[in-house]
Image (tube, rainbow, N blue to C red):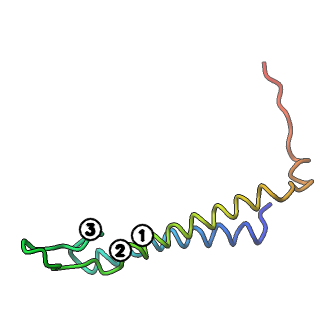
């Protein structure tokens, strides 16, 4: 059975990663060129165009989502299993 902590961790981590990858990716596409993470320069080395959303923000959102998943995994390892989960398991005989 999932608890409030399970649902909150899954929603928060999924939301952060979805926002960082898909959400801000769509914002970048709608903003137009350049689509890359690095600023575009001309032949003289002057910066001509920069991305709308800083790549460190996008990376930070994805890493924050992974950190939440890691903390959730550590929580699940540290907490003992419920008695109902153990009682529902069964073994099957091999042929």
Disc 3 marks which residue? Answer: 36
Q: CA distance from mark 3 to mark 1?
A: 15 Å
Mark carried by residue 43:
none
Disc 1 marks which residue? Answer: 22
Q: Is mark 2 in CB contact (under 8 Å) with mark 1?
A: yes
- Residue 72 occupies which quadrant of the picture? bottom right
Mark carried by residue 26:
2
Q: Is residue 2 left or right of residue 35?
A: right
3 or 1: tag closer to the N-terminus:
1
Q: In the rendered image of this protein, does residue 22 appear above or below residue 74? A: below
Q: In the rendered image of this protein, does residue 64 appear above or below residue 70? A: below
Q: Is residue 88 left or right of residue 11?
A: right
Q: Is mark 3 in CB contact (under 8 Å) with mark 1?
A: no
Q: Residue at x 44, y 69 (%)?
A: 59
Foreground: 66 or 83?
66
Q: Is residue 73 left or right of residue 63?
A: right
Q: Residues within 10 Å of mark 3 (few under 14, many from 20)?
A: few
Q: Residues within 10 Å of mark 1 (few under 14, many from 20)?
A: few
Q: CA distance from mark 2 to mark 1?
A: 6 Å
Q: CA distance from mark 2 to mark 3?
A: 13 Å
**Residue lying at the far top of the rendered structure:** 95
């Amino acid at each position: 059975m999932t608890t409030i902590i399970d649902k909150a961790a899954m929603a928060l981590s999924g939301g952060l990663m979805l926002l960082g990858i898909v959400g801000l990716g769509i914002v970048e596409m709608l903003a137009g060129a350049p689509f890359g993470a690095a600023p575009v320069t001309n032949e003289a080395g002057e910066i001509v165009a920069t991305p709308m959303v800083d790549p460190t923000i996008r990376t930070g959102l994805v890493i924050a989502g992974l950190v939440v998943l890691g903390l959730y995994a550590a929580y699940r390892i540290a907490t003992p299993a419920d008695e109902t989960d153990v009682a529902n398991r069964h073994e099957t005989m091999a042929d």
